[in-house]
Image: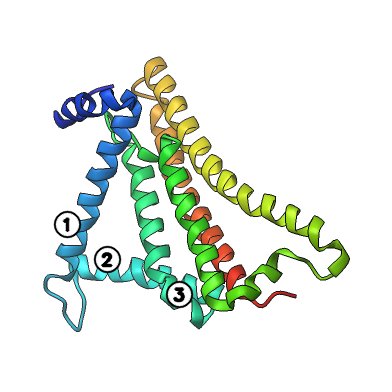
């Protein structure tokens, strides 16, 4: 893979003694790069806020308001406090997916650790919100409606909630890693003709995977806010 940044070699040298693989170091480096890009983009969009938006402010307002409307439509007004988390996950995952379409760049979401970290954030947030909202009564979400089946339902519910982490992780990782491998193969076979439609499909996959992750995160958090039945 073409090295777009010299600091990749430096970072690999630092992380290798700790058992971090080459791809793991790449994922960390590109994660930092994406964080820096999003930070610069935020500063550019907010450094001169106007009543009538234009340029970068207008572009970012369309994106932010679109995500906010989606949060409200799926979670209701009480979902607004979770908008920063949902928007951050959506933008980070989307940019992480898209950056892999640039030749020589590596998408962090093609490394299993990045989707896993995002999935764990959603998992922890879901249950912290449930405990904060319902207190001890949150346990009722895991007990089911029939008291004598509660021990069995509790076990099934725990497995189901843990499987959410696996599902979120493997769905995002599988799609992005698979697309990365297919794109590399096609680049090797026909570097001028075949990759173009594959890259167009890659843009579509990037948006869909970011949307699905965001939607599932909203559904899981919304479920923890509801009263147990």
Q: Which quadrant of the view contains residue 10?
A: top left
Residue 69: mark in rendering: 3
Q: Residues within 10 Å of mark 2 (few under 14, many from 20)?
A: few
Query: Separation of disc 2 and disc 1 at Cα?
Result: 14 Å
For marks 3 and 2 on the same chain, the one whose residue lies earlier in the sequence: 2
**Mark 1 lies on residue:** 40
Q: Is residue 113 visible?
A: yes
Residue at left offset 38%, top offset 24%? 193
**Mark 2 lies on residue:** 59
In the drawing, does residue 211 fall left or right of residue 38?
A: right
Query: Separation of disc 3 and disc 1 at Cα?
Result: 24 Å
Picture coordinates of residue 138, whole percent (x, y): 63, 71
* Between marks 2 and 1 in the image, the one whose residue lies nearer the viewer: 1
Picture coordinates of residue 14, whole percent (x, y): 20, 28
* Between marks 3 and 2 in the image, the one whose residue lies nearer the viewer: 3
Q: Check contact, mark 3 vs mark 2: CB within 8 A.
A: no
Q: Which quadrant of the view contains residue 97?
A: top left
Picture coordinates of residue 155, whole percent (x, y): 74, 53
Residue at left offset 50%, top offset 81%? 78
Asked which colour scheme the image uses, the reply is rainbow
Q: Is residue 207 visible?
A: no
In front of the other: 90 or 195: 90
Q: Quadrant of the N terminus?
A: top left
Q: In this view, does 115 lie above or below 2?
A: below
In the drawing, does residue 20 fall left or right of residue 39?
A: right
Q: Check contact, mark 3 vs mark 1: CB within 8 A.
A: no
* Between marks 3 and 1 in the image, the one whose residue lies nearer the viewer: 1
Picture coordinates of residue 164, whole percent (x, y): 60, 51
């Amino acid at each position: 893979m073409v090295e777009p940044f010299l600091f990749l070699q430096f970072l690999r040298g630092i992380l290798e003694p700790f058992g971090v693989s080459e791809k793991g170091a790449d994922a960390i480096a590109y994660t930092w790069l994406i964080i820096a890009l999003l930070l610069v983009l935020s500063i550019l969009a907010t450094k001169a806020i106007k009543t009538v938006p234009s340029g970068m402010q207008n572009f970012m307002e369309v994106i932010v308001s679109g995500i906010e409307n989606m949060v409200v439509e799926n979670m209701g007004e009480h979902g607004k406090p979770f908008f920063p988390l949902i928007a951050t996950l959506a933008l980070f995952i989307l940019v992480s997916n898209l950056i892999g379409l640039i030749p020589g760049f590596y998408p962090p979401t093609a490394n299993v650790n990045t989707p896993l970290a995002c999935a764990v954030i959603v998992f922890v947030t879901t249950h912290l919100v449930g405990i904060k909202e319902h207190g001890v009564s949150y346990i009722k979400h895991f007990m089911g409606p029939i008291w004598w089946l509660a021990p069995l339902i509790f076990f099934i519910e725990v497995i189901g909630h843990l499987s959410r982490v696996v599902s979120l992780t493997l769905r995002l990782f599988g799609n992005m890693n698979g697309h990365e491998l297919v794109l590399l193969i096609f680049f090797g076979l026909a570097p001028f003709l075949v990759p173009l439609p594959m890259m167009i499909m890659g843009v579509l996959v990037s948006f869909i995977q970011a949307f699905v992750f965001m939607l599932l995160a909203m559904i899981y958090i919304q479920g923890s806010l509801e009263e147990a039945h």
